[in-house]
Amino acid sequence: MTTALTTLNSVNLGALGSLVKTIQDEPTKGDTTWKASTTWDGGFRTTTTIRDFTPYATDEPAGLGGDDSAPNPVEQLIGALGACLAIGYSANATVAGIQIDELRVDVEGELNLETFLGLSDGNAGYETLRATVHIKTDADEAAVTELHNKVVATSPVGHTLSRVVPLTIELA
């Protein structure tokens, strides 16, 4: 008796396959809108609510005038990149039939606080970002390289950070 594989990398193969088929059959279902709402809690503390999840906090380190009660926005940004890449590895490895034994994505970057503080003109954001992927799998090097290239080519957060995205910030 053969048992069909229903999960790989803790991903439900049926659900993933259904999602892919739905978007292949009706590409407009792949066009989605995502929302978040952030409220100021005093000082440099904020609370962000996304869908029905538990709201999460943001703060600045004590050295930047905050209470250091939560990660700051630029830390959350690089955390979001790491999470997006890890999810991309999980999804694409699963589709390719690659078992992931361990995966960690380290992300770091440099930014200059002078512009953020209004002390100089220039870029207030990250100057560079680097992600290092640590993956343990039995797949051969060629398969891992192909997986890596696919993840880099399809990361929504990676693409957002690596190109100019129209941004509108308006007063209500």
Image (tube, rainbow, N blue to C red):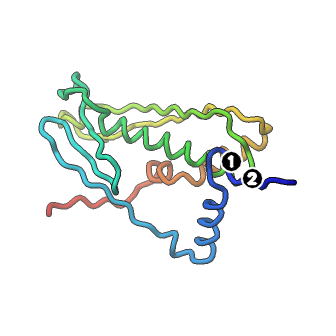
Q: Quadrant of residue 103?
A: top right
Could you tell me which secondary element the residue under label 2 belongs to?
loop
Residue 38, placed above or below residue 114: below
34 lies left or right of 133: left
Observer-nearest of 84 and 47: 47
At a point 23% along the width and 44% down the height, the residue shown is 47
Instruction: Say which quadrant the N terminus sits in.
Output: bottom right
Q: Is residue 148 left or right of residue 54?
A: right
Residue identifier under label 2: 5
| Residue 81 - label | none
Image side of residue 63 versus residue 157, left or right: left
Front position in the image: 162 or 55: 55
- Mark 1 secondary-structure assignment: strand
Pinpoint residue 60: horizontal percent, then vertical percent.
Answer: 24, 31
The residue positioned 24% from the left and 34% from the top of the image is 59
Please report contact status of discs 2 and 1: CB closer than 8 Å, yes or no. Answer: yes
Q: Distance of mark 2 from mark 1, alpha carbons?
A: 7 Å
Q: Where residue 8 is drawn, which disc sits there?
A: 1
Residue 63 x, y percent position in the rendering = 23, 22
